[in-house]
Image (cartoon, rainbow, N blue to C red):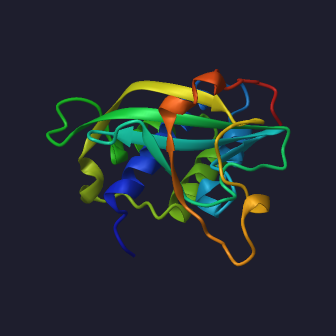
Amino acid sequence: GHLLTAQEVQGLYAELEFLYGRITRAKEQVATIEGWQGPLGGPHDYVLGDYAVEIKSLSGSQKDVIRISSENQLVSHLDRLYLQVFFLAEFHDCKKGFSLNQMVGRVRDVISDTDNRELFNSRLYEAGYMELKDYNAPCYTVTHQRGFEVRKGFPRIIPEALTDGLANVSYDLNLNSLEDYVCEIPFDEDVK
């Protein structure tokens, strides 16, 4: 195996932060854990019923710009697509916040069913995570988070707009241009 890069650690932390926030409020935890599609190579990090959620994170010197990794990342065949951005403070001495290992432990602790815990562990494995001392630092805290609805007019590159021969396009998205799309991502305990 190989160690996750610093960017992969931060990204996985943000996905787990989203998961933690949902399963601590859900009556049925399995739908959210099954909906975590990012580690399986799915088109979106989460598919929850009739909508999808793409998770992004920013920390430290990263300022208000997120990287969109492909022309397909902000396109969905589902009814709705959301972008959730976690703004993280990073601490290398770990006097504040949680490390990736600690965040994994927090999520495991709130998963009430053994089968659901096994499903969660399999997703972690698919994400390339193993509990190693290398993931005891850095630690993160969420300073704030913002949700955006990806709908008509949202600034993005989509596959249909690409000239023939172009593929695997990545680009930066300035969050300051998204004020008209700010929203709360819905929470439906009955998502199946």
Residue 89 figure quarter: top left
Reply above or below: 9 against 144: below
In the image, residue 91 above or below residue 157: above
Residue at point 70% right, 78% down?
165
**Number of numbered discs visible in the structure rendering:** 0
Residue at point 85%, 38% (across, down)? 79
Q: Where is residue 142 in the image (x, y as percent from the top left)?
A: 38, 28
Can residue 20 be seen at all in this image of the molecule?
A: no
Asked whether 32 or 55 is in front, the reply is 55
Q: Name which residue lies at 52% across and 62% down.
A: 125
The residue sitting at 60% across, 34% down in the picture is 112
Q: Which residue is more in the foreground, 72 or 127?
A: 72
Q: Is residue 41 visible?
A: yes
Horizontal arrangement in the rendering, residue 71 relative to residue 84 (left or right): right
The percent position of residue 29, horizontal first and vertical second, equals 68, 34
Residue 35 vertical position relative to residue 5 in the rendered view, above or below? above
Image-quadrant location for residue 69: bottom right
Q: Is residue 44 left or right of residue 57?
A: right
**Where does residue 93 sit, x and y in percent of width and height?**
14, 39
Q: Quadrant of the N terminus?
A: bottom left
- Image quadrant holding the C terminus, namely top right
Towards the viewer: 152 or 7? 152
Furthest residue to the left? 93
Residue found at the very far bottom of the displayed protein: 165
Compare residues 85 and 29 and report the one nearer the observer: 85
Q: Position of residue 58 (x, y in %)?
A: 39, 40
